[in-house]
Amino acid sequence: MTSPATTLPSITRDEFGEFFAALNGGYAPFSWQEEVLDHICEHGVWPERINAPTGSGKSSVVDIHLFANALAAVGAAPRVPRRLCVTVGRRALVDSQATRADKILECMEKAPADESAEQDILRRVAEALQSFQTSNDKQGSAPFETGHIRGELSNRNLPVTDISACAIIAATPDMYGSRALFRGYGSTKAARPRETALLAMDTVMVLDEAHMNRQLLHTTQRIAELQKCEVSLGVPTLQVVETTATPSTEDSDSITLGVDIEALDSPNDKELRKRVYSHKELVLHPIDKWDGKPGNRAVVDAAVGAIKDFLARREAGEDSEEAHTVGCIVNHVRTAISIKEKLTEDLAEEEVQLLVGRMRPYDLKKLQKENPGLFSTRGDKSVKVVVATQTLEVGIDVDFADLVTELAPASSLAQRFGRVNRLGRRKDSKVVVIRPANSDLVKKDAPPYKAVDLSNAYGWLESLNDAESPSVNPAAMVKNPPVQSSPERLLYQRPEWPDLLEFSRTDENPYDEPDLDLWLHDSLEAETAMGGVIVRDNLPSNTSAAMEILKTSYFAPRDQETFPANLKILKEILDYQDEHGVKPRKFLYRQGEISLWQDADHGAESSQSLAPGDVLILDTGSIPFTNQGIAVTQRELPSKKDELKAVPFPDDAKLYVYEKCADREERFRKYLGLSPEEVAELLDSQDSDGQKMIASELSAEAEDGQEVISWYAKVTDDKKSVEGSDIAQELALTDLVLLDDHQNDVAERTRQIAENLGLAPEFSEALELAAKYHDEGKRDLRFQQMLSADAETGALAKSGNRSVAEAYRARSRSALPKGWRHEQLSALMVAASPEKGGEHRDLVLRIIGCSHGHGRFSFAHDADFLLKEGYLPEGMDYEALKEQATRLFNVGYWDNLMEQTSRTYGPYATAYLEAVERAADAQISREGH
């Protein structure tokens, strides 16, 4: 899988302990972690289930994955999936997993510069993993890639371009599951098949606390089964692992590994034994007025009282140099906010931190920067209390001195108990559970929980409390396991072959997008689908001008500025009216497109409807929707309105809006009296400190009545601004790129990637052939004119020495119809030349036609739209090509070709082959060729 010239370091299985210790503060791996690695090395697959109590190091699946791939790279282990996707149903936990992956990456990137013996294993593992990278830009390349997708925008940093690389990806269930089904929430249609290939092929998906996501477990296990019916490409198909202390299936045939609390005698398990048998005294706190509702005053008062008791005890008797943060985990955001508000009457604001899943990533990163120890077991002594919702139940390595929680289902309580005295170092930690004074009060459902689950938890707590020394440590959880929550559904749905074929038609416009709840959610009743909200303070009042800014790639919506919010909150925002009965304007960001939300006339329903992944963009202060910086329903809003601030843009993109600019006289002086066209010509000739200038195509009226542009910006064009955008098909930031050179380079890179991946030779040949002709359609003379090609240089693949703005202007002024696709013409030209098709001719045509994610399963335009007489390259017969185009795109042969190749090779196999060619194309473009 690597070239003969590549010399890889020596790595052996026995060095895992040394590698693990280098990443984990000198601690050796536990026995169960070694056993999982042994299983992978022996069988080439992961176990289907990992049973491990809280605190036993389930997050080490990342370490195991990296080392197993390093062993495979040097030939010391079988080929294993290159990507690990850790999926967990709490957004903050997804952030935590992503942060840990980034920290491991940082350690491994620093290793080559550190010649110490303990760093040598990190250097060798990094070198082995780097051998999976196929880009020529290897200087300083990362040993592995990372990705992070949660419930707002689709993260543009998913490593789709480096498909052969080892990767760690963190995702929420909806974000992973929708992509596994070809319908990625928040993704553009063109990105869908590529993301599906990345996350559902050559990937192991680890579903943390799988009992909380039983439907997703069934769905992904079924996908893995169906992939085995597809053609074998030579790369691993999807592997699914459930990790939990309470397994969600009873399949006796499943291969299960994990912790045996009765067999912790190994020296390596000394630390684990201390955690399993840690001191966690259970204290039950009954209250009379418990009702399970958000913001219940009795629960708030009881929690605040218990927290203050803990603080007083700790301050009186503990070493002040250590962190003794008290944790409080409740069932509702409103309850958490109320507890924080009451605590801050006596404590400083910074001493009480609120942590819920609906935090804006920008705010979360700010909190992590200000209190880094808070998100690790070392703690932060400046923070006395952390108030949280279910977001802390799994996955985050916080280590509270004591814990206050309210009654929840037994499995949820077991997870919460794991957040206190996590490392077993304290001898006096206590857990207070606020619950009803008697079981008769638990008669009604208390969303998000059912009465039966709360009643079972009540009885379970009673049995734990009956012990001689009531404890809730992991050993107690194993001996007296929590009662599993009752199923939300009577039957779980399995995707079948026809479902997947339908879902894989990713580029079509169905009457209505399929509702994936049936395949993703345990509950079909609760409002679980997520979207997001963004506030901007720099949008002009002219809506058309505001749309211009939002559609400009430099100022497009970003993950870090998005408040996670469920669709109920989004619907309330849409219904909001100000004191004059006016609905403020709102913009909708969906699947990469910006539009103005069309409010219905009074009393009528809007023609638009919300969908999972939708993001609303608001003017700062126009609509209240937060409490303590958290998106909430209108009834949960505070009496004093939150002062929200928009997230600033990076320094390489400075936006100046006339009506918002405090120093507009200076900033806009040179543009006064100029039309937008005149300003565009002026800006094209300017270059300010290496930056490019872009401007509005709309005018505003200056204070003196003169015409002035609505806005302009100073931006820096770089690889990131071009890579992943549609303009990358036409633009290289350096010199122009010849078409023949580009196609030959992409074909060679495709061959290298296929070899690195271990693809079967027949598919490697088909991919290389498709790559060789994937851009033939760019020979259309209209396309060449757009690139400013001339007879001397020959046909171009990309123009050079242009800014992104200039490239977009060239496109808008070209003779090409809007929406014209060069890859559609590429497929047509190869179809008209049978000698170019090879053994898998239809597959080659498919890969060419889908090389940018379009054409699945049909193109929007027919032969008359695609071709124009007089603009074909020399030597091509217009009439013959028109006849072939009519057959393909008018009669329906292309649709048939797509259907047949999906059935012959499989929807996931074809998506993966398309993704390999697209990765090669993107890599070559990234390198400027």
Image (spheres, rainbow, N blue to C red):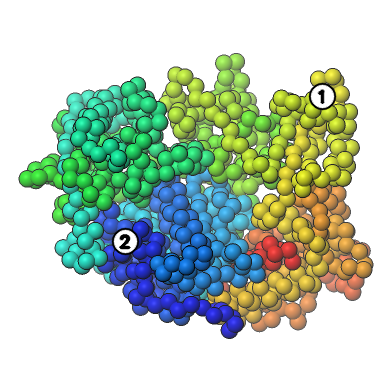
Q: Residue furthest front?
A: 116
Q: Is residue 441 visible?
A: no
**Residue 510 in the image, given as x and y percentages of width and height:** 61, 51
**Residue 859 in the image, given as x and y percentages of width and height:** 70, 59
Q: Looking at the picture, which amino acid does disc 2 mark?
A: Tyr
**Residue 706 in the image, given as x and y percentages of width and height:** 87, 24
Q: What is the secondary structure assignment of the residue under circle 1?
A: strand
For residue 268, which numbered disc appears in the image? none
- For label 2, the residue is 27
Q: Is 573 placed left or right of 820 in the picture?
A: left
- Which quarter of the figure is the N terminus placed in? bottom right
Q: What is the secondary structure assignment of the residue under circle 2?
A: loop
For label 2, count other residues whose C-alpha is less than 10 Å away and answer few (under 14), some (14-19) or many (20+).
some
Q: Earlier in the sequence, mark 1 or mark 2?
A: 2
Q: Is 526 placed left or right of 891 in the picture?
A: left
Q: Is residue 437 visible?
A: yes
Reply above or below: 690 against 703. below
- Which quarter of the figure is the C terminus placed in? bottom right
- For label 1, the residue is 701
Q: Residue at x 49, y 48 (%)?
A: 150
Q: Is 369 placed left or right of 910 in the picture?
A: left
Which residue occupies the foreground of this view, 459 or 640? 640
Q: Residue at x 88, y 62 (%)?
A: 789
Report which quarter residue 588 is drawn in.
Answer: top right
Report which quarter residue 87 is drawn in.
Answer: bottom left
Reply above or below: 876 against 26. below
Which residue occupies the foreground of this view, 829 or 756? 756
Q: Residue furthest bottom?
A: 4
Q: Residue at x 28, y 53 (%)?
A: 55
For label 1, count other residues whose C-alpha is less than 10 Å away and answer few (under 14), some (14-19) or many (20+).
some
